[in-house]
Image (cartoon, grey):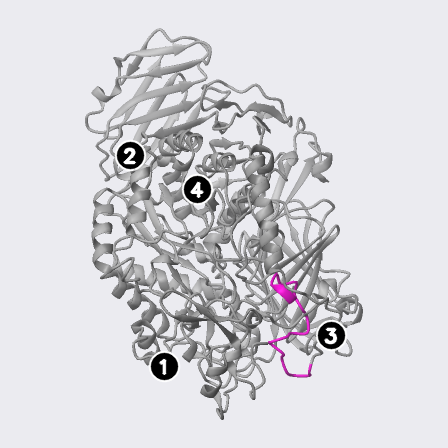
Amino acid sequence: MVGFAHLFAGVSLPALAFGAAQQDPLQPFSNLATATDTAERTQFTLADYVDVGEELIANVDDPQAVNAQSVCPGYRASNVQHSTHGFSASLELSGKPCNVYGTDVESLVVEVQFQDTDRLNVQITPTYVDASNESWYALPEELVPRPATVPDASESHSDFSVTWSNEPTFNFQVTRKATGEVLFDTAGSVLVFENQFIEFVTTLPEEYNLYGLGERINQLRLLRNATLTTYAADIGNPIDENLYGHHAFYVDTRYYTVDEQTGEHTYVKSSEADATQDYVSYSHGIFLRNAHGQEVILNPKGLTWRTIGGSIDLTFYSGPTVAEVTEQYQRSTVGLPAMQKYDTLGFHQCRWGYNNWSEFADVLANFEKFEIPLEYLWADIDYMHGYRDFDNDQNRFSYSDTEAFLDSLHAGGRHFVPIVDAALYIPNPENRSDTYDTYTRGAAKDIYLKNPDGSLYVGAVWPGYTVYPDWHHSEAANYWANELVTWYEKVKFDGVWYDMGEVSSFCVGSCGSQNRTLNPAHPPFKLPGEHGNIVFEYPEGFERSNATEAASASAASSSQASATETSTSATSSYLRTSPTPGVRNINHPPYVINHVQTGHDLAVHAVSPNATHVDGYHEYDVHSLYGHMGIRATYQGLTQIWPKKRPFIIARSTFSGSGRWAGHWGGDNYSKWSSMYFSISQALQFSLFGIPMFGVDTCGFSYNSDEELCNRWMQLSAFFPFYRNHNVLGAISQEPYRWASVIDASKAAMKIRYALLPYFYTLMQNAHTAGSTVMRALAWEFPNDPTLAAIDNQFLVGPSILVIPVLEPQVDTVKGVFPGVGQGEIWYDWYTRTAVDAQPGVNTTIQAPLGHIPVYVRGGSILPMQELALTIRDARQTPWALLAALGSDGTASGQLYLDDGESLYPDSTLNVDFEASGSSVRVSADGGWEEANPLANVTILGISNEPSFVSFNGQQVPADYDAVSRALFVTGLDQFTNNGAWGEDWTLEWE
């Protein structure tokens, strides 16, 4: 290190973006790195302290914190102006400014707009906003559009009414007209609006049922005593903490009994509900359009919403069902989700640690050897030249070898997706051979984030010191799109995995501004598998099923921990920031959110808050939008590569509206049963957020998986829209062919999944066109049963498939409820085709030996199906089958959507409707898409007596009847459907 001191002798240092890594200017900056010997060269490793920020105490934990409600004066409304769509008023401080966590804004404007029958907007903004403070309060509509007001909207046509009062200070109430229930009520609290702190409070009913407010790992129904922080963070999936995305949207469901005589609604607590009784529910949604860091503090009686900037822009959605709330939210506000390619519903295999194309070839060969379907292979950062985007390692992933492998992969009907990170390597200016054209082209356009003084912001990620595209720059998206197009000329990928967009940096501040000559550099931590970071962790229960191996791993883990243990000192004092009148402290805002990173410093493991965009916005004001805008730029690039095809993007950091362009995976989870358990509530959250293409790293990302966990998880994930196995560098391999039982379990679950792919695809189309959900909570599909409100250990795929997985080790049964049975719903076992004998609200014990996942079909459903094949291309060429599960009234229905599976705007489509009633199944089709595959068979469940005659369009056909399952199997239908299963309308009858 000493040898590098002369590089900085006498150099005057530019103003850097904030960070603890900004050392004394008189000290050599080379202290930020330590030498690490590699086989190729001496590489510098960033010192671990470069990612250490200030030690702060979260406001919710701080005994010295001031309660704004007790000291702030609130506002008084005046100058009320009514309009066709609502009203506006001036708000003036009602007393002396409190300036508790910023400078009070003395004059505000509140505007209430009835935007549509089912939508209301309440916006509170400063009266005086100009170029000097616009970025503090205004979220540009080109970044996050505001929902529009329809021309004929008015209060008289609204599902809502709004009242307000100045007693004792300004407060307002939003009421649902249909029930008279107050949905949002700020009475009894004061509005606090400062330049770095906003707080508003609403009461909630006892034992309320809230869902959403992500992204975080938690139960489906939010706890009633919790602090929910929202600020995009690169962090490996902790429980109940802020994560990668920002979705300030929640759904509130309330249950009632209704007096038959008066129509009066009486609120019912879910804990006191009786599954045999009748109730009704009403759900509404609330969205806060604000990109700043924020917290929602839940207590048993209400909700406190706090942000560290921006304005109040609340939109209310009247529902009254969860399904309608999510549709209203998507259609009006965040946009409908992108339609996915059909083949993306196949199985995806990935890991960090596939080191060359030969290893990929071995993986592919093993999937084929064991006849496990595989659709996509994914490459983690291993393929990159020095972890640089758009640049292959020419020793292990040369472009000639890449072309040969991908040509073969594509010829076999399979696909490839590489990872692309948000940050870009900046070359070493003293090494002429260290060229990187991607950086050079961006530098020529001057499209990178800056420090406050205008110098380049240089953070650090996998390649070493890095720069960041500034998505506010008018040329940034075009630049990014061009890089994708240019790289595609050498690497024929089929989609993009966009990662690290929180946006992540492995050091605090612009740590690389004076250290570019140290590039490339190793991150300030050991990678998994490196000496001192060997992976020894296994799932819960491993010590019982594999006692000897578990003991050995535990001993080795303890030895490693002792060898790498570092001394720590207890922190007795914290940095506390006092507001300065009229000035914002964006590096250390006076109100400290309970941010997940160590010390709660916003600059830790992220680009610093005062990194500056070209339009003057600081990262502080738009931090959680970085990944969202990177997704949009990636989508733009893929549409340039394939102008007529649907882009396929899976991203980690998302914002409200990201579903228009991308799907999401649950991030860096663990090979733990707890991670598998929470994957269900994660998926259901993103159903609410309008991102149906969701999945998790099956079998877990971090730590080692084991046979039992992977067996169960491969089966569970088969019922998530995005189905991928992925794990970390240094952990044991966990491809499904690694264990014999996992091979069998995976194939068994995939057989069901691939049979249901037409159903999945139809659900995705409905989500894309109507804003419906794919994965559904029981409470949302059966909205009038309060006993279902908290269930998150089972779920529905669409309206018709119920999945009750095993989520704990070393058991061979699972308990599950069968919703609706008290109201006549019938559930059929997928495997036996028999109706389930279940009682309302009762946890039924279900046999579930290892390798078996309980799956049920809802009575009243008709499911179009095809056969299992090793690729989607081949699966789409198999014959069709229908499964008609009759309801208690003897009827059933279903639908099917088909197209070419990839066109952005298909030239032809096909919609097929299925109806069963009166001892017949009728099929009618509409559209120009020609489906050539014939219909092979029809299975009808719930027929009480054996038919004497079965006909297809009037011609008798062979059929078998199972008296035990009461199922009718009709075969030999291919001879009647030579023009395709849906080539013409047909009727199947029995008597």
Residue marked by disc 3: 100
* Identity of the residue drawn at 29% across and 51% down: 357
Q: Which image quadrant for residue 819?
A: top right
Relative vertical location of residue 125 with respect to residue 287 in this rendering, above or below: below
Q: Nearer the viewer, residue 213 or 428?
A: 428
Q: Nearer the viewer, mark 3 or mark 4?
A: 4
Considering only order in the chain, which callout, 4 or 1, is on the residue closer to the N terminus?
1
Q: Residue furthest bottom?
A: 10
**Image coordinates for residue 945, horizontal then vertical, percent:** 44, 8
The answer to whether marks 3 and 4 mark residues whose Cβ atoms lie closer than 8 Å is no
Residues at marks 1 and 4, CA–CA distance in whole angstroms: 42 Å
Task: Report the amino acid beneath label 4.
Answer: Gln
Task: Please give the label number shown on residue 734.
Answer: 4
Residue marked by disc 1: 429
Residues at marks 3 and 1, CA–CA distance in whole angstroms: 47 Å
**Image coordinates for residue 774, horizontal then vertical, percent:** 46, 41
Q: Nearer the viewer, mark 4 or mark 2?
A: 4
Residues at marks 2 and 3, CA–CA distance in whole angstroms: 63 Å
Left or right: where 105 falls relative to 50: right
The answer to whether marks 1 and 4 mark residues whose Cβ atoms lie closer than 8 Å is no
**Image coordinates for residue 322, horizontal then vertical, percent:** 55, 44
Q: Nearer the viewer, residue 320 or 811?
A: 811
Residue 159 visible in the current orientation: no
Q: Nearer the viewer, residue 922 or 705?
A: 705
**What element does badge 1 sit on?**
loop
Task: Report the amino acid beneath label 3.
Answer: Val
Task: Please give the label number shown on residue 875.
Answer: 2
